[in-house]
Amino acid sequence: MAKKKSKTPADSAESPVAPSAQPVKPKTKAKSKAEDASSAGTAKRPRKRVSSEAPPAGGEDLMSQAVVLCQEQRWREASSIFRRMCDRADADGNMDLYVSLSAARLKVEYSLRRQMVASLTEAAKTVLAKEYLLDVG
C-alpha cells in the first residue's frame, strides 16, 4: 500500500498556480537614445515665430498686428488698433466681436496707463535725485 503524502506548505509552493493569479509583467521595449530622439523628432510641433520687427501695415490682419504690439509692450499702438477694430465691428453690427474687442481694448489701455505711470515714477525719481544733490551741494 502506498502512503498518501500530505501536502506541506513547501509542497504547495511548488505546485502550479493558475495563470490569472500570477503577476503579469508587461513587455517593454527599451529604446536607445538615438531611437527615442528620432521618434520624438517626428512628433514635435513647430515653434512659434517671434518677430522683433514692427508689423507690416497691410500685410497681416489687424488682430495679428495687435498681438505682436502687445507682446512688444507697445500699448499705445495696440490700443489704436483695437479702437479701429471695435469701430469696424460696431459698423458691421457684429455685437459679440464688439464686446470682446472692447474688453480687450480696456485691458490694453490699462496696461498703457501702468506703463505711463511707471515712466512718470522713474522720471520723478531722477528729478528728485538731482534736486537733492542741488540742496545738499
Image (cartoon, grey):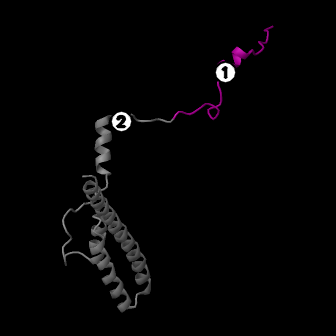
Where disc 2 sits, the SS reads loop
- Say whether residue 9 is magenta: yes
The CA span between labels 2 and 1 is 37 Å
Count neighbours of disc 1 (C-alpha within 10 A) and say few if under 14, some if 14 to 19, many if 20 or more.
few
Task: Identify whether 6 is placed above or below 137.
Answer: above
Residue type of the residue flagged with mark 1: Ser
- Between marks 2 and 1 in the image, the one whose residue lies nearer the viewer: 2
For mark 2, what is the residue? 31
For the N terminus, give its image quadrant: top right
Pick the front one: 76 or 135: 135
| Magenta residues (range) | 1-25
Task: Identify whether 27 is placed above or below 97.
Answer: above
Q: Earlier in the sequence, mark 2 or mark 1?
A: 1
Pick the front one: 84 or 33: 84
Count neighbours of disc 2 (C-alpha within 10 A) and say few if under 14, some if 14 to 19, many if 20 or more.
few
Pick the front one: 94 or 14: 94
> What residue do we see at 28% from left, 43% from top?
38
For mark 1, what is the residue? 15
Contact check, label 2 and label 1, Cβ < 8 Å: no
